[in-house]
Image (tube, coloured by chain):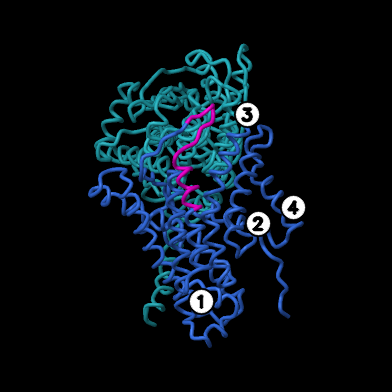
Amino acid sequence: MNATSTLRIPFFLLLACASLTGCGPGGSHSGEILVGEFASLTGKEATFGVSSHEGTQLAIDELNSAGGALGRKFKLLTEDTRSTAGESSTVVNKLIARDGAIAILGEVASSRSLEAAAVCQQAKIPMISPSSTNPQVTETGDYIFRVCFIDPFQGTVMANFARNTLKAKRVAVFTDVKSDYSKGLAKYFKEGFLKSGGGEIVAELDFNGGDKDFKAQLTSIKAAKPEAIFVPCYYTDAALICIQARQLGLNAPLFGGDGWESDQLVKIGAEAVEGNYFSTHYSPDAGSDKGKRFVEAYKKAFNGKVPDAMAALGYDSAMLLADAIRRCGSTDSQKLRDTLAATKDLDAVTGRTTIDSHRDATKSAVILQVKGGSFKYIETINP
Amino acid sequence: MSQFLQQLINGLALGSIYALIALGYTMVYGVLRFINFAHSDVLMLGAFAAYFLNPSIERTFGPQSIPGALLVVLLSALICAALGILIEILAYRPLRNRPKLTVLITAIGVSLFIEYTCQHRSVFRAETRPFPNLFPSRDFQWLGLAVNSNDLVVLAATAVLLTALWFIVQRTKTGTAMRAVAFNPQAAALMGININRVISFTFGLGSALAAIAGILYALKARGIEPLMGVTPGLRAFTAAVLGGIGNLPGAALGGFVLGALETFAGGIPAISNYRDGIAFALLILILLFRPAGLLGKPQTEKV
């Protein structure tokens, strides 16, 4: 690198800063409606972030080709959280303070949504999480919403599924103690399973997300002879746990929550994940007419890729926001918040959505099974 | 009882991975008296080399063939040996006569440089990729005990490499030169030993070991990403210290002890989330009573 080019870089940075501060917050008042999005586009949960982002982008494009809202077009500003802790609050601060976003959409992982929720609540900017299911996310404050069901519901659904469909009386629970999502789901599953009576939790073990060796815990689980094993965690760990369970000759079915839904689960886990179950928000096979139109549009936009639940929820999060903006006729954050809170029976891709008094969505869950390398629809469970 | 034996098998399987990685740390330390923190990243590069080489080799040898797998391992080891030598020439050689601390900090810098460069979207990107099965694996069940063939391969590789390394260091001319450089570099140079060549060889050998360990680790962990080396690297470094750093059989012993401690702690329901904490607390205890490590000899420092 020569002397002139080293000098040139700071100069361009200076120029860039000047132009950004020049049109920063002012940009939201004229022209486009600026919507901020933060997603794990890279890193451990990248397939979630990418799906969610694609769904959101599709919604924004469809809204814009239908004329936008309030006579203005939408503009989606996306930031990557790299699936790491600490990044979400930074990028959301940037989206609000520098770019002047009027609302924030994101994230998938509850731990990262919790981080950003604190920032949004303080700035009084409405935030809609597409798929964070831990109850604490919306408990952060009255500006935080979500379009998905929450873990108490999902945990209860899986407890009923274990007892009624799997006919399991002895269940083991294997929790990722590093993740708020996993701990929450495990807790509500245990409550739901024990409350109904007749069932027994025979082993409870913990691991740290990102571990590669689970055989120590799985050996203890095997010794307790469970009929089914509940493993609420994300797909990379879930795949490895399935592999090592089969290696130890542990043949009881494993089942988890929506954190399992990724094609990486099948790519890494291969034959070891076959026959296992998980609950999620949506299945392309169980869709309404609206759902079918969404699947077609998504396939067209993203080279024939079939949308997963994260994509459908990303889409719904943008649609929920647009619906509220249209109904309140303004992008003022206070009015927007009040209108969002009053959403009732919105016809969304993932089912009819009503925002309850805790700013959570009430809607149904579906159970899928891994079969032949893809996800097969088993049943829908209503709240 | 069968549960205890199963945990012992699990512990040995995990420990043999640590042992294999620890060999590389301890050998470089034995010759150069410094910890090469980039070792865990060369391990990651080895796994990625195998990941990218495998498709073309599978096309010639057919999927999951043993000669094909050996070729993948050999080529990845050669690539990483070259990388290790390059790292030494670029980063450590200019600092040869500076205080040891300078080299140590540089090693941490090299490690971070490799990790974050590889996460860039034009290099490997940050997401996890599924690692292919290089050779067929199967599970053996016997009296309720389960062993995976991959774990046996790791155990065998550790034993073979440990013997080979011991032979190289103790019984060959290059090994004699390595020990001479470790004992006194100036005197070794005066005796006509080409110090640069000996040190390059040491780094090449250490990096080849890292590549082999990386591939075997990836076969167990199934997913590879640029930060995959960090955790096993740290554990293996601890294992090397536990066994007595600089001592080859010590590194292997340290690996097995650490693997077994972690596994037994992880198998107890109420405390399974403290498995690392318990393993490392026991480590501190052991080092309190044997500061030089299990097989290390206490050394008097020259003042």
**Depth check: A230 or A353 in front?**
A230
Q: Which residue is mark 1?
A: B177
Write down which chain is painted cyan: A
Tag 1's secondary structure? helix
Tag 4's secondary structure? helix
Figure check: B149 above or below B98: above
Q: Callout 2 environment at 10 Å: few (<14), some (14 to 19), or many (20+)?
A: many
> What amino acid does circle 2 point to?
Leu
Mark toward the start of the polypeptide (1 vs 2): 1
Of discs 3 and 4, which sits in the foreground?
4
Q: Which residue is mark 4?
A: B285
Q: Chain of mark 3?
A: A
What mark, if any, has residue B242 been given in the picture? 2
Whether the residues at callouts 1 and 3 have beta carbons within 8 Å, the answer is no
- Residue at figure coordinates x 37%, y 54% from the top left: B73
Figure check: A78 above or below B5: below
Q: Which residue is mark 3?
A: A204
**Depth check: A211 or B30 in front?**
B30
Whether the residues at callouts 2 and 3 have beta carbons within 8 Å, the answer is no
Write down which chain is painted blue: B
